[in-house]
Image: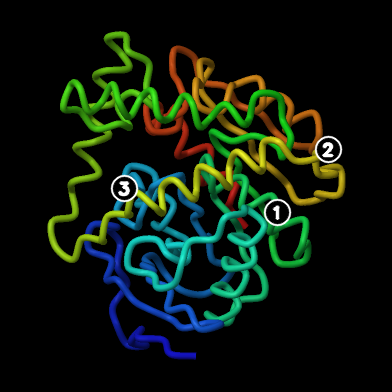
Amino acid sequence: MNNTASPDESVVTSYADAPTRTVTAGGVTFAYRELGPKGGIPVFFFVHLAATLDNWDPGIIDPVAKNRHVITFDQRGVGASTGLVPDSIEAMAEDAYSFIRALGFDKIDVFSFSMGGMIAQDLVLKHPNLVRKLVLTGTGPRGGKNMDKVVGTTYYDVLRAVLTRSDPKEFLFFSRNAAGKAAAKAFITRLQERTVDRDKPISTRTFQTQLKAIQKFGRSVPADLSKLTQPTLIVNGDNDRMVPSVLSEDLHQRIKGSELIIYPDSGHGGIFQHHARFTPVAVNFLAT
């Protein structure tokens, strides 16, 4: 293992200031950032389609890291991580497992969003003893109804963004009403808080491979999520065009004892639009 972390660094409390580190596992050098006090069970953040380390909202990360050790990372072939991006969600989950074990952890909490939630589900099913608590936001189950339509919606909204010279996330994550547009602008601004050591943007080929993996996940035979025994929090907006909101209800029905929150007047990025309301709930849920 080649870990560039320094053991005597002071605690980082802001995601904008978290240094980018690397660890090598299975021939892949994973880029990651960590912040918050070390000790106890860490919270690993699993990011969305086309995202790198720079795509996590500090409005969510920073409050969680106030009392918890938080770790974000680039999947294989994404951002500053080496290798080729896998063409299946299962393979992405195994890469995540390799990364987690390379850092020496055998028990974690998981916070996931969108594609990250798909990866998290496969990780927990394959390695059930690894994860203590699970947060699934803006996501859906393997084989869920219309899951495979994410691809068409994504390409459509990316085109709309190009034509209006906007960030695609403004269309993909938020409703195009006044509240949604304002929330989108605020979210994009928060993502720019980090001004140094920015991550490498993903390539078009990586983006297309990830989309194919999501499509394959959506068209697969449903997984038996009744096997999940971890306390699970499921969250979405009420008008998610990317991963239809009804799929959050589907997850809730499949995962026994799970908790479901649907935020009004919001889309795929409901947790970002309502971050001030959502974050205290997430912090409380993840508390030991």
Give me the residue at 32% from left, 17% from top: 180
x and y percentages locating residue 239 in the rendered image: 51, 15
Amino acid on which disc 2 is placed? Lys
Q: Compare marks 3 and 2 and give the one earlier in the sequence.
A: 3
| Residue under numbered circle 1 | 122
Local packing at callout 1 (Cα closer than 10 Å; few below 14, some 14-19, many 20+) is: many
288 relative to 39 in the view: left or right: right
Above or below for 117 versus 78: above
Q: Compare marks 3 and 1 and give the one earlier in the sequence.
A: 3
How far apart marks 3 and 2 lie (CA) works out to 31 Å
Local packing at callout 3 (Cα closer than 10 Å; few below 14, some 14-19, many 20+) is: many
Give me the residue at 75% from left, 65% from top: 127
Q: Quadrant of residue 176 in the image?
A: top left
Q: Residue furthest left?
A: 195
Amino acid on which disc 1 is placed? Asp
x and y percentages locating residue 141 in the rendered image: 70, 37
Local packing at callout 2 (Cα closer than 10 Å; few below 14, some 14-19, many 20+) is: some
Q: Which element is circle 1 on?
A: helix
x and y percentages locating residue 12 in the rendered image: 29, 68
Q: Which element is circle 3 on?
A: helix
Mark sitting on residue 58 = 3
Amino acid on which disc 3 is placed? Pro
| Residue under numbered circle 2 | 256
Give me the residue at 16% from left, 27% from top: 165
